Image: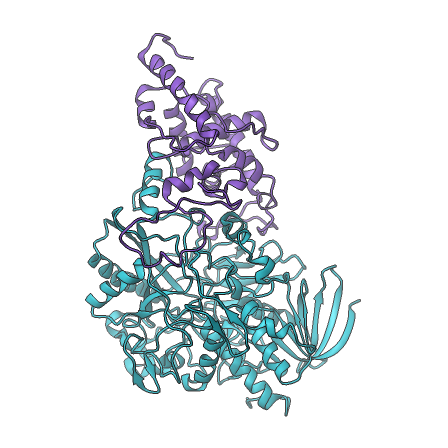
Chain colours: A cyan, B purple
Amino acid sequence: MATAKPKVDAVIVGMGWTGAILAKELTDAGLHVVVLERGADRDTQPDFAYPKVVDELEGSVHRRYLQSLSQETVTARHGLNGTAVPYRQMGSFKPGTGVGGAGSHWSGCHFRALPEDFKLRSNVEQRYGAKFIPSDMSIQDFPVSYEDLEPHFDHFEYVCGTSGKAGVIQGVKQAGGNPFEGSRSREFPLGPNPNYLGAEMFYKGAREMGWDPYPIPASNASGPYVNPYGCQMGPCNACGFCSDYGCLNYSKASPNISILPVLRQRKNFELRTHAQVLKVNLDSDGKKATGVTYLDAQGREVEQQADLVLLCAFSLYNVHLMLLSGIGKPYDPQTGEGTVGRNYSYQNLNRVVLFFNKDVQANQFIGIGGAGTTMDNLNGNQLDNAKAGFVGGGIIWARQPGAGPVRGINVPPGTPNWGTAWKQAASDAFRHSFYFEVQGACMSYKQHYLSLDPTYKDGFGRPLLRMTFDWHDNEVKASQFLVGKAMEMSKILNPTAMSGDAKKPGEHYNITKYQSTHTCGGAIMGSDPKTSALNRYLQSWDVHNVFAIGANAFPQNNGYNPTGMVGALAYWSAKAIREQYLKNPGPLVQA
Amino acid sequence: MFDDDTSPARRDFLRKSLTLIPVVTLASAGLPGTSFAQTPASDAAQGAQPVTPAVPGDYKPTFFTPQEWAFLIAACDRLIPSDHVGPGAVELGVPEFLDRHMQTPYANGGIWYMQGPFLEAAPEFGYQGRLNLRETLRIGIKAMDDSCKSTFSGKVFAELSHPQQEELLKAAESGKLALQDISSKLFFTNLLNEVRNGYFADPSHGGNKNMGAWKMIGYPGMRADYMDWVTVRDKPYPLPPVDLAGRRG
């Protein structure tokens, strides 16, 4: 029998970015909020303190700051007829756990989506005709516009001390920024970070290609900063331990340093760690959630009743909890009916490595997580998709989050993996190579979805989430096109050797190789309850007091890192809860 | 040992081992500037019998058996040999790293999903068997040694010549070497990963003695502060590495 805890106004599952944002907004509104986090409590001191935090074996092999797969993971298969097998060892994507979640071990790239990304299907249909979209491609427009989210993009950037250069402010183009971006209400809170060699050389190559390079917006503080909540950030010291690591220097924005210092002081905020939520409980007719059931640190079942249940548990686990709890109808790829699990998408990431002589000091051990140089000339409406032959675009960037030898040393193609020749190549390359990456959009398809696995169970006896996903011809074409352009630009820079990993026709999704933690979709927002699990406020169409906040809401993924968009959607949803839902609890959009 | 004790190869081997051993001792005493003019290619040309390089310090394995330990020393010495490029895995203490690392929760599958059923799947889905890291290495070492014994009239891996060892490692790397109980490719991949981890990880984990691997590639180690060097282009980064314990290399 579960122990029952006194009812609270809102229970939040997960203490990452979205959980922290919702907790801040709802405690501002006077609600009593309980956050249940499956992992441990974490803060800069002592968890990310130097020197312990920069141990590469602990961070990037033992994965101390990431989720262990031993209790919870997913299964994966390439197609509807395959048998899924577990994601047993960390590879393709790296979910977080503990306070801060993936928001504590991200790099810091902080983009806004382009205005046209919000209306992808109608934009593609208008530009190239409906027939240009493959019949199995299930892309949809977002039910919100860039203009709807602009104040929230802006606010989240100011919370994060995002360092960058605006390209368009109130409709006026600004030199040095991205000329193709949606109009901003004001400049970034901090100017761009300094350029390391690869980011500097990107300017040269990109300009010769006729492109418009600009600094990647990075939530790695380029100077001292105090955010609107009074939380302080120190200038990034380029330590080179961002991705996989918590920040030792209060420089990388995270829930831990950007929001929690305020929350932890509040009497109407309660954080319970090692609290593993098992399911959302519904009332007898399944129309309303009554709270959640979780396991506490001692393994006891506890029932936490609440008026509002906010799923903030990372995209994949939000979908998992909805499926386990019977919130909404599971998607069936055969009939196209049901919405939960529909439109799972990912990120089309590819890399080009450039090798140079020893007089070229690339120093890739230096790193500023999100910082670098990128360009949008092959993204959004800048790309002629009809000519390129695929839907969606992408960006090419020079980014250097910091490399150490345990994390791997890139060596020129053809180098053996061991012995003297490998040692020589690794020694020659380590300080004299860098890479560019292609971050491509990833479309959604009728056959790519999330569901419950029929065989495998997690450590709590629940079915694992099953991912059915593979590379579609559209994404293979995009990879070849964008990597080709990146290599064309790279040649201008005269490397002594170069390698590129464009996807080959028929190439399957490889879950063993790290690509990106940008797992998207599965519980998407939309304007039609037949084709979306959530309405435009990220509220479940089926259970009105459940909101699922995260990249699970993206109908498909664009060419940018999702965190900026996820934060903006969280503030957007919080505003609707505060201003509309609390006054009149019920569906915010009539189906 | 040698079929012909008067062969030039043997004389050359003895000469080299005499020069080799004191250098290794020096390296373990923490003196800088050790390097070797000898290359594995010259070994191969001379068909030299393997010499067991000295593991620095007086580390005694507590996880691996003496036979497994001999295999690991021989394999480390082939995968990352001492040569003109820089120190080898053995002199940097990688066997010690491996022995200690096998006793961590990580090597026991602590962060891996280990529940069955264990189904065959395409390589894109990763290892789907039930072995954790320490079992993979232990079973792999035994299988390699058993294979050697049947092929090389009773000799185990550590007793073979360097060229023979290298051929076997190449065959395992490609998966062409048929072993009992385990895929040679799986074993090799895990072994190489672990040897590299030990070679490059912080010295507190047992390998990378005196930050030798970091010095070789020019990694400043755990300095983690490069604010003043992001935009410097015209000269190499000047400072030697530091480790987690605060020692300077």
Q: Is A327 positioned to the left or the right of A223 in the image?
A: right
Q: Is A191 positioned to the left or the right of A67 in the image?
A: left
In this view, the residue in front, B129 or A42, is A42
Q: Position of residue A302 (x, y in %)?
A: 75, 68
Residue A532 appears in the picture as rendered? no
Q: Position of residue A230 (x, y in %)?
A: 55, 76
Residue A178 appears in the picture as rendered? yes
Quadrant of the snapshot with the N terminus of chain A: bottom right
Q: Position of residue A276 (x, y in %)?
A: 67, 64
Residue A15 falls in image quadrant: bottom right
In this view, the residue in front, B180 or B202, is B202
Residue A546 falls in image quadrant: bottom right
Relative to A242, does residue B204 appear above or below in the rendering?
above
Residue in view at x 72 percent, y 73 percent: A304
Relative to A588, does residue A396 appear above or below in the rendering?
above
Number of numbered callouts drawn: 0
Q: Position of residue B238 (x, y in %)?
A: 35, 47
Residue in view at x 30 percent, y 22 percent: B45
Quadrant of the snapshot with the C terminus of chain A: bottom right
Relative to A590, does residue A40 appear above or below in the rendering?
above
